[in-house]
Image (cartoon, rainbow, N blue to C red):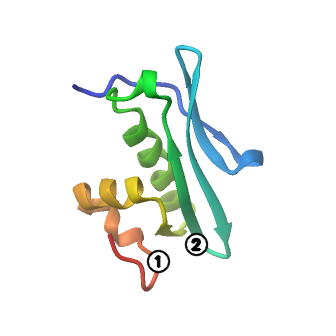
C-alpha cells in the first residue's frame, strides 16, 4: 500500500518523532550522544500497521540527522531494515555502524 502523507512532529523534549493518527501515537525514539543520533525504538500501534507510518517516521528522523550534520546509529531493527532498503541514507551511518 502506498504511503499516505501524515503529519510528523519532532517532540524534542521527549527525544522522538511522532505522529498522532486515528487516536493512536506512532513514534521513533532516539538519543543524541555528541554528533550521533542513536535511533533505538520505532513503534506503531497494531491498528495503524501497514500504512507506511513507521517508514515516514524513520525518514523524518534521518532527514533531521542529515540536516543537522549528525551521524546515525540504528539500534532499532526496523530502522536498520529501512536503511537497507534506502541506500541513499547509508552515508549517515556513524563509524562502525552497519545495516
Q: How many marks?
A: 2
Left-right relation of 29 to 91: right
Within 10 Å of disc 1 (Cα), the crowding (few <14, some 14-19, many 20+) is: some
Say which element carries label 1: loop
Question: Looking at the picture, does residue 43 appear above or below residue 63?
Answer: above
Q: Which residue is mark 2?
A: 36
The mark found on residue 72 in the picture is: none
| Residue in the picture at 42% in, 39% down | 54
User: Residue at 57% of width from left, 66% of height from top?
Assistant: 38
Q: Residue furthest bottom?
A: 96
In the rendered image, the quadrant that contains the N terminus is top left
- State the residue lying farthest toward the right: 13
Q: In the image, what residue occupies the spot 60% across and 51% down?
A: 29
| Residue 52 placement: quadrant | top left
Outermost residue to the top: 22
Instruction: Say which residue label 1 marks.
Output: 94
Q: Are marks 2 and 1 in contact (CB under 8 Å)?
A: yes
Query: At 49% from the left edge and 66% from the top edge, which residue is drawn?
Result: 75
Q: Is residue 93 left or right of residue 17?
A: left
Question: In the rendered structure, which disc, 2 or 1, sits on the residue that comes first in sequence?
Answer: 2
Q: Which residue occupies the foreground of this view, 10 or 39?
A: 39
Amino acid at each position: 500500500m502506498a504511503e499516505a502523507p501524515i503529519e510528523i512532529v519532532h517532540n524534542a523534549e521527549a527525544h522522538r518523532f511522532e505522529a498522532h493518527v486515528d487516536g493512536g501515537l506512532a513514534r521513533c525514539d532516539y538519543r543524541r550522544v555528541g554528533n550521533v543520533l542513536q535511533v533505538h525504538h520505532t513503534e506503531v500501534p497494531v491498528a495503524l500497521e501497514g500504512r507506511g507510518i513507521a517508514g515516514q517516521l524513520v525518514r523524518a528522523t534521518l532527514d533531521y540527522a542529515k540536516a543537522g550534520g549528525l551521524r546515525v546509529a540504528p539500534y532499532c531493527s526496523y530502522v536498520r531494515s529501512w536503511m537497507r532498503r534506502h541506500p541513499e541514507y547509508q552515508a549517515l551511518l556513524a563509524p562502525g555502524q552497519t545495516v
